Amino acid sequence: MLPENTQDGRGRIVIENVRPQVDAGRYPIKRTVGEKVVVEADVFADGHDVIRCLVLHRKEGSNIWLEVPMQPSFNDHWQTSFMAARIGRHVYTVSAWVDRFFTWRHDLARRNDPKDIAVALQVGALLISEAAERATGAAAIRLDEFADALRKAVAPEAGKQIGGDAELGELMARHPDRRFAVTYERILEVVVEPERARFSTWYEMFPRSCGSDARTHGTFKDCEKRLPYIAEMGFDVLYLPPIHPIGVTFRKGRNNALVAAAGEPGSPWAIGAAAGGHKAVHPELGTLEDFRRFVSKAKERGIDVALDIAFQCAPDHPYVEEHPTWFRWRPDGTVQYAENPPKKYQDIYPFDFESADWRALWDELKSIFVFWIEQGVTVFRVDNPHTKPFPMWEWLIGGIKRDHPEVIFLAEAFTRPKIMHRLAKLGYTQSYTYFAWRNTKPELTEYFTELAQSESREYFRPNLWPNTPDILTEFLQYGGRPAFMLRAALAAMLGASYGIYGPAFELLEHVPRDPGSEEYLDSEKYQIRNWDLARPDSLRYYIGRLNRIRRDNVALQSDWSLRFHPVDNEALICFSKSNEDCSNVVLVVANLDPHHTQSGWVELPLKGFELEVEKPYQVHDLLTDVRYLWHGSRNFVQLDPNVAPVHIFRLRRKVRTEHDFDYFL
């Protein structure tokens, strides 16, 4: 049973600076199944008595608290960990008390005066007898025997030996006097999610472009044929833009033309038509049964289908007629369309979240997720969540995850940092980042050190995208093939979760609609594209190699071990990831200049990698399979971007066997 804080002055313990916690416990921290929750606290009391300290944790809804002893280090700092073993919400806190027995035992060992020892043995016998009353069965009998032995002890040294007995210490530790235990003032929470919440590899694809040519609208059955291609590249999440019926009124044309020509398909984000809204599929893609079959076929290949949920409507959406109060009406009797002056989006109607009918609106939006979960979808990418109310997301995601803790939510919010972080605190599993626009060594080092090492890592899980249908960066526009290779490698190695928008990425799509724009020319957002997946210049095999490296190296499957290392050339960046015991260390050296060969000296912390300074070690390039023998902490690298803009090294220690020959682990 969870002890309560004592209010009568006998609870002498102080518990401060408990970590991890987010905003003083207002929001939960996040872990995935099998990860540790390392708990730290400053715990002390008046005087010099011995303190016992525990972490208490349980799954939400359970009445049974599990206890894990905390260990002291320096300056009254305590630490321990427990395993996040099951998905769902768990709670934890810290409890501590002054332990009279172990204080007695500590003092007994230091006593020299026989008279003092004789009195102390009687005190100890009383403490042990009290513990026997708290115990049951064999433990109670054994404790009574120890108490009796202390009372009968004649020689001081014999009594001290009994008091210091290891079995006695174990029994007393199991039956402490916790009447005056103090518990930390907050019950903290941890949300435990599937492994894919921490380590995932995303591929975005427009289903309508999976047909046989640019004039033929793709179907879910065509998407099934694309699955081997995606699986071969090593992706485990296939993300689809909205698959719903597309509005006709104010439909956008090719290259975002204000008026669509006859037969043009419109934007998938203009959701809703006569065929239905957010709970329907576009008729040209197939039926709902076809979609369920596609999801099932993807799962057979280890791929989760992720859906884009965009809370907005085309003018033709059934909601507009059925629930007019969910929209903002202008004085001229028309619905307020989306705009970001001077940009206008007449084909999109945003919801009015200040509507008097807001509760019904919230319920309906939540039901959209529930509907698609019932169709087999457990991964969602949410479009522009930062333009919807924060309280709604906390309520909606919390409710979904109570019933379906396996569900993953990715927040597509390229906005101000505090807003992105707020969404993550409210429950979003993963978050888009500014990676696409971080190109220089200082930019990358500062940003990713923050993501991997600051306290925000307790709740903010980054998902890195070098491109999206909305983002074609200047670096990709002008960097050529080396730029695509570099950005794919950086995304895959820096982030445990990353994604690409394909086939545009692997086929090196780089032409913008206008100079200075990040919009693609002939964007799939407004037209059907036909992609030649067999093109000889495709990066499909290179990307497949990157993803195999990620699967084969556990160091790359989390973010917290990321460390940057000095290189004496600003065009080169070096970083590493490692597992807990450094049996798997991956070192990446990348040339950030896509146009010129760059070289420099890399400096490594050998002791941090558990490498011996005087012994050589091997660096095995996992991209090219070339192996190099390095010596000491400083080594030379040279990278020609037209050959290979990046080294991905697996560090291997050199060891000597009993047969007197060397090999590398």
Image (cartoon, rainbow, N blue to C red):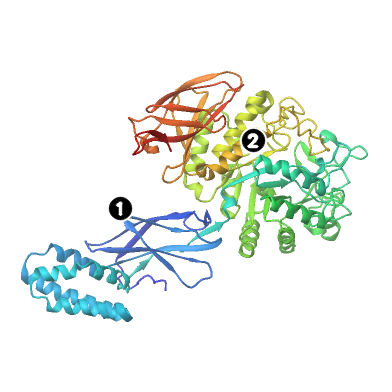
Q: Amino acid at mark 1?
A: Ser
Task: Answer with the quarter of the image where residue 16 lies.
Answer: bottom left
Position of 362 with respect to 5 (left or right) is right
x then y, percent, for residue 385: 67, 49
Nearest to the observer: residue 210 or residue 592: 210
Count the marks: how many?
2
Asked if 121 appears above or below 220 in the picture, the reply is below
Determine whether, in the image, residue 257 is placed left or right of residue 564.
right
Quote the CA–CA distance across marks 1 and 2: 45 Å
Give coordinates of residue 289: x percent, y percent. Answer: 81, 57
The answer to whether residue 82 is seen in the rendering is yes
* Three-letter amino acid code at the position of disc 2: Ile
Residue 27, image x, y percentages: 53, 57
Q: Tag 1, which secondary structure?
A: loop
Q: Residue furthest right?
A: 262
Q: Quadrant of residue 644?
A: top right
Q: Which mark is residue 543?
A: 2
CA neighbours of label 2 inside 10 A, class few (<14), some (14 to 19), many (20+): many
- Residue farthest along the left direction in this orientation: 114
Q: Earlier in the sequence, mark 1 or mark 2?
A: 1
The answer to whether 18 is drawn above or below residue 441 in the figure is: below
Q: Residue at x 6, y 67 (%)?
A: 113
Quarter residue 551 falls in: top right
Figure quadrant of the C terminus: top left
- Badge 1 is on which residue? 73
Nearest the eye: 360 or 126: 126
The image shows residue 137, relative to residue 194, as above or below, that is below
Q: Nearer the viewer, residue 247 or 573?
A: 573
Mark 1: few/some/many CA within 10 Å (<14, 14-19, 20+): few
Direction from residue 146 to residue 412 in the image, left or right: right
